[in-house]
Image (spheres, helix red, strand yellow):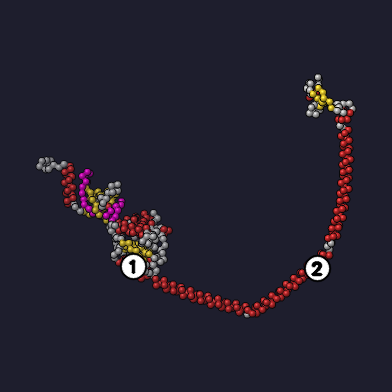
Amino acid sequence: MNTNTNNLVYSVGEFSHVIKKLVETNLSYVRIKGEISRPSFPGSGHVYFTLKDTDGTIAAIIWKYTLPRLSIKPEEGMEVICSGKVTTFAGQSKYQIIVESMEIAGEGALLKMLDDRRKKLLEEGLFKNEFKKPIPYLPKKIGVITSPSGAVIKDILHRLSDRFPSHVYLWPVAVQGEKSAEQISNAINKFNELTDQTIIKKPDLLIVARGGGSLEDLWSFNEEIVVKSVFKSSIPIISAVGHETDTTLIDFVSDLRAPTPTAAAEMAVPVRDELLARVDEINLRLKISFNNKLNNNKERLNSLIRLLGKPDQIFENKTQKLDFTYKDIENLFKSIFFDKKNQITKCSQRLVPPKVLIGNLFSKQQLFETRFKNYLEKIINRKETKLNSLDQLLESSSFNRVLDRGFSLVINNEGKPIKLSKEAPKNANVKIRFSDEIRSAQLDK
């Protein structure tokens, strides 16, 4: 065993520092391709993950101040190329890469990522036709979201000017790069915040456009933040991104997809000259139709006039008919009056003079009066006779007849008869009624 005592002896910390300096000096900037595995997003804001392939793994970290500058967000299974510097972490005796930039590794990985995102948004219902808004036929104000430089905005403005000059609001944005998706989403949101009361009025239509490019160049229009802003927009949106063969996720969610920015301008407004020609054509057809209708009505009116005949003849016939009718009515009334007069005469002949009627009634009254007196006298005599009979019967049944035969009646001071001895106490003062008078007495004195 080699036990050379001249070799330096390092502490663990010293040796870790040597290794760190050696790695950072020789590997100051590297680009590593691999698949992202187990990404972690702690509350510190940093991102930790592992880059792996079939032969090995390496730890990776993105500082929170670097994350906003990245054009893509780390996701599980994403194949990327990470650029940065390699360093060591003494606490775990491992090396790691500090990521400063990140890009998709190849178009195949981008397409897979795009398809996965499309399926996810499709399941969320963002692409359903029921949510799409109709495009206004003739928008007064059009908002365009694109780069302020380049051919796209010029083509749109030129095409709008040729077809139907409109009021255009340009919201300049970066159409590719790190901040592009955020700027496009913000522009859509800000346009929707405008109202008819703001200085800049709310547009009737939005056009989101850019020219052609590679899949990476158009990637901003595949970001969820842009897709969801288009979905939430209350203003109808026409997407015009890339060439006719290019397809981005914004095309699925927008209310109308145009193959090119120029085509978007054509879809936004009709051709002014064609509209004027159409209006002239409709106006001409209206005049022809009105004249035809007027001529037809004139011919029909003339036919009716011919059928009616001359007005003088019509009035003469009507006047003669009216005279005959008046004569018939006059004769009818005369006949009615004559009949009624005869009826009144016959009725008057049957009437009895009032004096005769009054005399008859007076005689009847006297007769009834005599009959009533006789009847009343009979009733009175009959009742008087019956009353005398009853009086005699009552007199014969009176107790006075008993007193006349020698009996007497004992009564108390109230005049009530005393029938039993128990009704009068001892030494009670009573009265005795005889047939001729009443005497006072005291019982059992």
Residue 345 as seen in the image, left or right of residue 277:
right
Does residue 76 belong to the magenta stretch?
yes
Please give the residue where the numbered disc 2 appears in the rendered image.
342
Q: Nearer the viewer, residue 171 or 28?
A: 171
45 versus 295 height, above or below? above
**Where's residue 329, x and y in %?**
72, 72
Q: Residue 38's spot in the image, x, y percent?
A: 29, 48
Q: x and y percent of residue 370 in the render?
A: 88, 50
**What's the amino acid at mark 2?**
Asn
**Camera-side residue: 255 or 373?**
373
Q: Earlier in the sequence, mark 1 or mark 2?
A: 1
Identity of the residue drawn at 39% across and 61% down: 196
- Residue at 89% across, 43% down: 381
Q: Which residues are magenta?
A: 68-94
Residue 157, disc:
1
- The reply to whether residue 415 is in sight is yes
Task: Work out which quarter of the rendered image holds the N terminus and state it.
Answer: top left
Q: Amino acid at mark 1?
A: Leu
Tell me: 382 left or right of 331.
right
